[in-house]
Image (cartoon, helix red, strand yellow):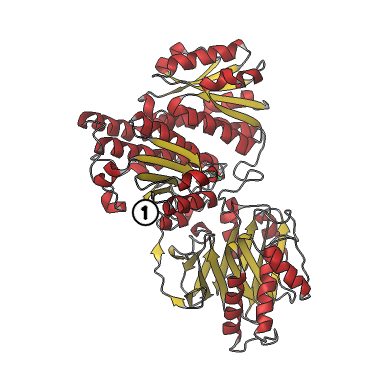
Amino acid sequence: MCGITGYIGENKTTDILIDGLKRLEYRGYDSCGIAAVDAKGSLYLRRVSGRVDALDKLVAEDPAKGARAGVGHTRWATHGAPSEDNAHPHTDCTGKLVVVHNGIIENYLDLKEKLLAAGHKFKSETDTEVIAHVIEEKLKALNVQAAAVRSEMTEPVFFEAFRRAVNDLKGSFALSAVWAPCPGMVLTARMHSPLVIGLGKGENFIASDVSAFLKHTKRVVFLNDGEMAAVRKDGVDYYDFKGKKTAKDSVTIQWDSTMAEKGGYKHFMLKEIHEQAEAVENTLRGRLLPLGGDVLKAEMGLTSDDIKGFASVQFIACGTAHHAGLVGRALFENFGIPSYADVASEFTDRAKLMRKGTLVAAISQSGETADTLFAVREAKAAGAKVIAITNTVGSTLTREADYVLYTHCGPEIGVASTKAFLGQLAAIYLLAGHFAAARGILKASDARRYAEDLLKIPRLIEETLAQEKDIAKVAQHFASSEHFLFISRHVNYPIALEGALKIKEISYVHAEGYAAGEMKHGPIAIIYKGMPLLAVAPSGRTLELMAGNVEEAKARGADVVAIVDEDSRKRVKAGRYITLPKTDELFTPMLSVIPLQIFAYYVALAKKCDIDKPRNLAKSVTVR
Ligand code: G6P
């Protein structure tokens, strides 16, 4: 949550900061701001309540002159309402020191009390502003006069004050600071919030994630918790919080910046829905055959012997990723492998019960979700091995897990997750196939069929996407409904949950996802005449029961949309149908979710909602 950017170099600092913020807006978008200094140490600061476009306009009306170093921020409010006063960057009492921050300073009230007693004046309700004043105190303690402009002492003094301040902070932070008398250096530090440095030629970048500066450089260095960096235009030095220099390796990111642009689609969400066949294909590529063999060994050190050694699999995740975990549970259980799925935030006690033979599969698009990371640490401490299923190279999760299975979906910008979910499902089906084959649960010919069926999924996704216009019509018909019900069973039960979540996220209307078998235990009572009910009912073991559930709902007035295949369509009597291409029942979640994503998209479009940046949400939830 919240995105930070930083820049130092000879190019147009404010443009680079603002462009970076636009790319990070998915992390939070209730207010934003930038600050930059010129070579003489004059500070330029602009903030707005609202979106980065408004900031861009404000800066264009009265541009900064000669700025060569700066920081920027787009906010998802935690402490203090979204307003210009609470927008970052925040300043100290002198107005010469600015900070931007992502995270939560847990001891800010203690610090604030002391600072107030020392005479500091606060202008916002945020925890972040405290940091600026703590640095100011440290500068004072080092006997610095702000007048010491361009003295050769400004850099070491600023560094030391910043370092000492960072050591006083408790909680999570990705932090960057600029001090006007020291225009040649931007300082940055990380603790439990993502932070990455981009290495350019004669310029360097700081950001919460690489998409902010990918168009300038793909060479990056990821900071770890407890690390800080002094970023100058000609180089970057890395330190621990004690001030000891550390050596860091750079990595080259494969994504290119155009992958994070809309490419002719009206919204990122729609573009990303259309990228799902590719996401699945890329995630499966080179990792499937031979199923049960040692194909994952070279990439992540996971051998078929390791796989045989795990007694159970525990999925943990949040949001949409949790729904992928629930599909995983059904799939592993289908193979007779004990499996569990929990939301990471409710895992604390169960984490302590993890044992050596459990493989904890932590699913996270961003690899930065605070609850998921917390759960991983607890599970590891209890003795479990952890596999990360993530889309983000270098994310915190990848550094904490024992094994990393990347989904290769490319950047996902829309806040409502779509292609990342498909990538997660592909990774889980891949893993389940290897588990079942390595343990002899899938015999050779069945394993081959499983792999073949899985490899056909990208083509079937394309066929499903081709029905977009028909699905859009169904969505338009129901667009003014205030309640939606989604039901299904077994592997598709999580898809009912995901369908409801998509509607809630981007249309702000009430939607419930239910296991169809639970209908008679309560939800059926809420059905009224004309209520939209979307039922996922593919052919297979759950069809008869689903057909019955649809009848019961219709009898009480529900207006049913059945997501079926050609065969199950004959059995389920609904008012409207969306017909999926045929695949084995086990693989249907990778197809059935697509009409529900498209449905949610067009309901939100008809309601004129801000689809890529839904209210109150952020893509990456980095606070607990
Ligand atoms: C937020 C996003 C969701 C996402 C969830 C987990 O709530 O809006 O789309 O599913 O976080 O994120 P992760 O990065 O861990 O998959």
Left or right, residue 519 beside residue 291: right
Disc 1 residue: CB within 8 Å of ligand 1: no
Q: Which residue is mark 1?
A: 402
Question: At numbered mark 1, what does the secondary structure look like: helix, strand or loop?
Answer: loop
Q: Residues within 10 Å of mark 1 (few under 14, many from 20)?
A: some
Quadrant in the rendering for residue 140: bottom right
Q: As displayed, is residue 445 above or below residue 565? A: below
**Residue found at the very far left of the displayed protein:** 444
Q: Is residue 364 visible?
A: no
- Residue at 68% across, 52% down: 30
Q: Residue 247: x, y in percent?
A: 41, 74
Identify the residue shown where x is 53% and y is 15%. Answer: 550
- Image side of residue 103 versus residue 297, left or right: right
Q: Quadrant of residue 531?
A: top right
Q: Is residue 30 visible?
A: yes
- Image location (x, y in percent) of residue 67: 63, 74
Residue 483 position in % (x across, y down): 65, 26
Image position, residue 259 (x, y; %): 46, 50
Point 48% across, 14% down: residue = 547
Instruction: Say if 232 sits above or below 310 in the image.
Output: below
Look at label 1 and name its amino acid: Asp
Q: How many marks?
A: 1
On-image quarter of the N terminus: bottom right
